[in-house]
Image (spheres, rainbow, N blue to C red):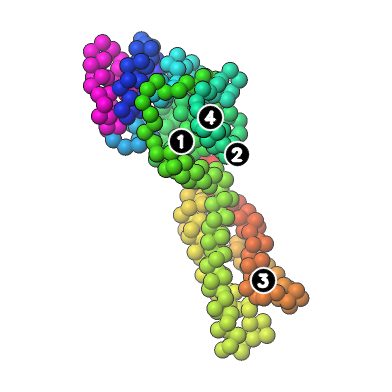
Amino acid sequence: MYSVVLPVLNEKESLKELLPHLLSPKCEVIVVDNGSTDGSVELVETARYNYSNLRLSKGTGTVTDAILRGIKEAYYEDVVIMDSDGSHPPEIAYKLAMSLDSKDMAIGSRYARGGYSKDSLRNKFISKGLNLLTYPLAPKITDRVSGLWAIKKSKFNFSIRNTVKPVLEFLVRGKLKSVVEVPYGFEPRVSGKTKHNRSTLIFRTFWDVFLLYMAKFRVFNYMVVGGTCWIINLSIYYPLTLAYKETVTFLNHVYYLPPFVVSTFISGSIHYFMNRKWTFTDRKDSSLGFLKFWTSMGPTAILDVVVIYLLVEYLHLEPVVAVAIAILGVFLIRYTIANRWVWNHTREGSEE
């Protein structure tokens, strides 16, 4: 037995065609309505008199809200998610569910051998482009933006964002050991039109993909944090250098080095707390984590000072330019230290 989740918003005509072909003794169908006003709810409520395995869940929110609500309310371990507009053939639900006998997740693919799409040329172009953009996130999957998929309910064990493409969230953030694709033919919707604003949808999708890249490739997070702190460092360093050069006589012949120590300590401390809250959220550090951080980063700061001195004294670069180059130059060293030593223990309940 398996459950089928159908997110619905004003799909009365499509449901008339879909439900009779989808309902079978082998499954339950959960119509998850998000506030339909076209009679979709009434249609399902009437159909429930004839089908004991047809259920209705009422609520509001996004498509992802509906999907997650449906998964939570499903009776069975194997859950299939498909569109309610008729673009997904009803017979594919059984194939996807059966694929979960040996896999954690099954994805309906338009691009695997045997699959096809009869969507509009514009939609095909957008889909192909997005599929290419997300290739590094799941390179073994051919249809990474599919809206047709199935998953074991027990794998729904992490906090999922309200995203346009939930299948990508599961592929990147889920602890899935095995995924299989099932080819299918995508058909134009039976009736009605999409409820999404295309421009908003594209923007949200790009933002979601960006966040997934950050989640999958930790070094990208570290780069954003490092870039932010790099700007902070230079913003503090430049005025300090001017002030030190004019007012302080101690080490005045290398006036550009003492300000760097101050700006590096401030930006480095911000760097530590930003990485703790964002880059390494699944890691834990000791109670002396801040001290451990600076113990490990101290040698790279010394390396920075040496590089800055050489760039200023021998290549005659402006101090602020030398500082920018030095910080960028030791980026990978700092990331390796942070990843392998400062935050090298996974938090309880998390996995790498």
Check disc 4 and report its element: helix, strand or loop.
helix
Q: Residue 87, labelled with which disc?
A: none
In the displayed structure, does residue 310 sit left or right of residue 193?
Answer: right
Q: Residue 121, labelled with which disc?
A: 4
What residue type is disc 1 on?
Lys
Per the model, the C-alpha gap separating discs 2 and 3 is: 34 Å
Q: Earlier in the sequence, mark 4 or mark 2?
A: 4
Q: Position of residue 266 (x, y in %)?
A: 51, 70
- The residue lying at 65 percent from left, 57 percent from top is 333
In the displayed structure, does residue 285 sit left or right of residue 83?
Answer: right
Q: Earlier in the sequence, mark 1 or mark 4?
A: 4
Per the model, the C-alpha gap separating discs 3 and 1 is: 44 Å
What residue type is disc 3 on?
Ala
In the displayed structure, does residue 316 sit left or right of residue 286?
Answer: right
Which residue ends up furthest to the front in the rendered image?
A: 121
Q: How many marks?
A: 4
Q: Position of residue 245 (x, y in %)?
A: 60, 85
Per the model, the C-alpha gap separating discs 1 and 4 is: 20 Å
Per the model, the C-alpha gap separating discs 1 and 2 is: 16 Å
Q: Residue 322, labelled with which disc?
A: 3
Q: Is residue 141 above or below residue 237?
A: above
Identify the residue under disc 2.
136
Q: Are marks 4 and 2 in contact (CB under 8 Å)?
A: no
Q: Residue 165, labelled with which disc?
A: 1
